């Protein structure tokens, strides 16, 4: 019965492996990132070692010992996934959880990004958690190369890798260098990741990532506003105004929010005529925030002496 149970567990772990391999881009050659640093991990320090590897690769000088104080949890003999993400943000790096597919790992590697993965090297009912860094993928012979444990170049089969990764629910993350974005980033999750970085490390580290995102999705009003707000918070209102003005011809989603933010900046700078025109454009654009746009317009007209002031009798 024990043998049958073990066989059932292994068979369930195999489910989806052919599909995962079939999703890899056809005609692609092997990809391996030789320059990714390696920190051997001992005494359950695989979390700090893996994160130090990708942070060093991104240009942030660190070590497993430097990260261990905030990342390693002695009573758990390891590190939790939310703390892996939070520690990367505290280092001023975008921390992004990628889709748990081998094809997503391949896309990140081809973009030059090492990928931290969580593995369960034992069983679902008796886990042995382990972080490693994927630095290579060889579609022809079906192998993955990891920075793992005390091995700088641990090469294992897709089958073994996917077994152990599946038992950890395919968790994976990347930490792109400033100005870089995950190759597999989706607009919504990336926006949240950028907001989390800004909330943790402040606006300065986030600006290069906001700028890259606004460049990748030039039609997105939220990304134009996100970049402008970060630049404004860093103390450069003129640059924030230029971001919004430059974005308007391209924006297709959330144009009203762009106009409204532009109106607020222009009003603050004393350009009330320009501010009123921008606020009128925001109201004309409509959308779910139109009442806020109307409030902005009313406030500007009040300041120009052209209408009743909000709250006046």
Image: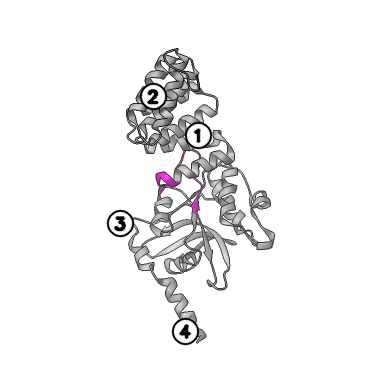
Write the start and end of the magenta stretch as one range.
173-189
Q: Which residue is at 42% across, 36% downward?
A: 223
Q: How far apart are marks 4 and 3 (CA)?
A: 39 Å
Q: How far apart are marks 4 and 2 (CA)?
A: 66 Å
The percent position of residue 213, horizontal first and vertical second, equals: 42, 38
The percent position of residue 257, horizontal first and vertical second, equals: 40, 31
Residue 115 in view in this figure:
no
Q: How far apart are marks 2 and 1 (CA)?
A: 18 Å
Q: Nearer the viewer, residue 231 or 270?
A: 270
In the rendered image, which residue does mark 2 sit on? 245
The 10 Å Cα crowd at callout 1, few under 14, some 14 to 19, many 20 or more, is many
Quadrant of the rendered image containing residue 16: bottom left
Tell me which numbered mark, 4 or 2, is placed earlier along the sequence: 4
Up-down relation of residue 302 to residue 200 (above or below) = above
Residue 96 in view in this figure:
yes
In the rendered image, which residue does mark 4 sit on? 4
Q: Report if residue 151 lies within the magenta region.
A: no
Q: Which element carries disc 3, helix, strand or loop?
A: loop
Q: Which element carries disc 2, helix, strand or loop?
A: helix
């Amino acid at each position: 019965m024990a043998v049958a149970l073990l066989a059932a567990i292994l068979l369930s772990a195999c489910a989806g492996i052919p599909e995962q391999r079939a999703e890899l881009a056809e005609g692609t050659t092997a990809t391996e990132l030789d320059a990714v640093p390696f920190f051997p991990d001992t005494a359950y320090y695989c979390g700090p070692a893996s994160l130090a590897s990708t942070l060093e690769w991104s240009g942030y000088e660190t070590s497993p010992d430097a990260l261990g104080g905030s990342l390693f949890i002695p009573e758990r003999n390891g590190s939790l996934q939310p703390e892996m993400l939070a520690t990367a943000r505290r280092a001023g790096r975008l921390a992004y959880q990628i889709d748990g597919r081998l094809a997503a790992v391949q896309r990140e590697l081809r973009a030059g990004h090492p990928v931290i993965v969580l593995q369960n090297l034992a069983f679902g009912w008796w886990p042995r958690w382990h972080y490693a860094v994927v630095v290579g993928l060889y579609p022809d012979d079906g192998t993955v190369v990891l920075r793992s444990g005390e091995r700088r170049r641990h090469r294992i089969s897709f089958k073994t890798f996917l077994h152990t990764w599946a038992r950890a629910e395919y968790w994976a993350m990347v930490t792109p260098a400033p100005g870089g974005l995950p190759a597999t980033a989706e607009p919504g999750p990336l926006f949240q990741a950028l907001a989390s970085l800004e909330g943790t490390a402040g606006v300065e580290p986030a600006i290069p990532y906001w700028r890259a995102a606004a460049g990748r999705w030039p039609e997105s009003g939220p990304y134009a506003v996100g970049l402008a707000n970060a630049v404004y918070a860093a103390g450069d209102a003129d640059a924030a105004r230029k971001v919004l003005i430059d974005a308007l011809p391209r924006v297709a989603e959330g144009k009203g929010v762009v106009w409204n933010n532009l109106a607020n900046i222009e009003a603050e700078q004393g350009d009330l005529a320009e501010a009123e025109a921008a606020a009128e454009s925001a109201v004309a654009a409509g959308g779910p925030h139109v009442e806020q746009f109307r409030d902005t317009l009313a406030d500007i007209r009040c300041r120009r002496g052209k209408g009743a002031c909000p709250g006046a009798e």
